[in-house]
Image: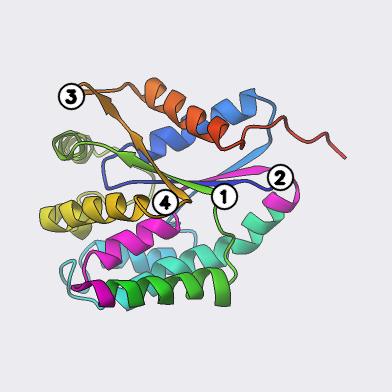
Amino acid sequence: MRVLIAVEGVDGSGKTTQVKLLDAALRDAGHTTLAVSFPRYGDSVFGELIRRFLQGASGDSGAVDPYLVALMFAADRSSEAPRLREALAEGRVVVCDRYFYSNLAYQGAKLRGEAEVEHFSRWLRELEYGRWAIPQPTLSIYLDVHQQERGARLASRNASGAGEEGSVPNDIHERDASLQARVEQFFRATAATADDLVIVECQQGGERLSPQDVNARIIGVLAERGLLSAPSPAP
C-alpha cells in the first residue's frame, strides 16, 4: 500500500512537532519513511518566492490574488513531486507538514461567496492532482487547536526566534487574526464533508493535550483507517 499522510493546521497548531513524532513512530514500527515540510523555504525557487510573499514584500495578506498565491504553493510541491513519487514507489510512508488542504484553506478563506470558493476548490484540485499530478494524500489530518493556545505558541516562538531554518517568523498570515479565524472555520467545514480530511482534537475537557497524547490520537486514526499495516518486506 502506498501511503502519504499530510498533517495540516492553522499556524501554531503544532504540525512540525506531530510530523516528527509520527515519523519516529512509523520508523519504530519498522516502516521506512520520508518526512517533508512545505513550503520548502530556500530549497526551491518557489519556496523563495513564498518566503518573500510571507515577509510582506508584496503587501499584506490580501494584497495578492489568492489564485496567484495558491499557484506558488502548488508549484513548490510540484517541484518536489518526483521525489515523493519515488519514495512511494519504494514503499516508504511519506509524511508531509502542510499539503493541499493548507493551500485550499488559506487562499479559499480570502474569497467571498460559496460559489467563488467552490470554483477555486475545483480549479486547485484539478491543477495539483490533475495537470501537475502531485501525489494525492491517502489521508490528511487537521490538528484542531484552540485559537488562544495557538496564539500563545506563536508569541513564544516569535519571541525566542525558534522555528525551522529559513522560515518566516510572524509572517503576514500569522499577523492577520481575522484570516486565521476564517482558515480555522474553513478547515472545520471542509472536514465535515471531505472523507480524506480528519479532525484530530488537540484538547480534552478544555485542557490542551501533550504532544505525545495528540500523537496517540493520530496513530489511532491511522489504525482505524487501516493505514498501519505491517511494512512490506524488503525486495
Separation of marks 3 and 1 at Cα, in angstroms: 31 Å
Crowd band around label 3 with a 10 angstrom C-alpha radius: few (<14), some (14–19), many (20+): few
Q: Is residue 8 visible?
A: yes
Assess whether mark 4 and mark 3 are in contact (beta carbons under 8 angstroms). no
Q: Secondary structure at mark 1?
A: loop
Q: Quarter-wise, where is residue 109 in the image? A: bottom left
Residues drawn in magenta: 88-116
Residue position for label 1: 138
Separation of marks 3 and 2 at Cα, in angstroms: 37 Å
Assess whether mark 1 and mark 2 are in contact (beta carbons under 8 angstroms). yes
Image coords of residue 202 (percent x, y) = 30, 30
- Give the residue displayed 55% in from the left and 28% down from the top: 24
Assess whether mark 1 and mark 4 are in contact (beta carbons under 8 angstroms). no
Lower position in the chain sequence, tag 4 or tag 1: 4
Residue position for label 2: 1
Residue position for label 4: 98
Q: How is the image coloured?
A: rainbow
Crowd band around label 2 with a 10 angstrom C-alpha radius: few (<14), some (14–19), many (20+): some
Q: Amino acid at mark 2?
A: Met
Residue position for label 3: 206
Lower position in the chain sequence, tag 2 or tag 1: 2
Task: Please determine whether, in this image, residue 109 is positioned above or below residue 151.
Answer: below
Task: Please determine whether, in this image, residue 63 is positioned above or below residue 182.
Answer: below
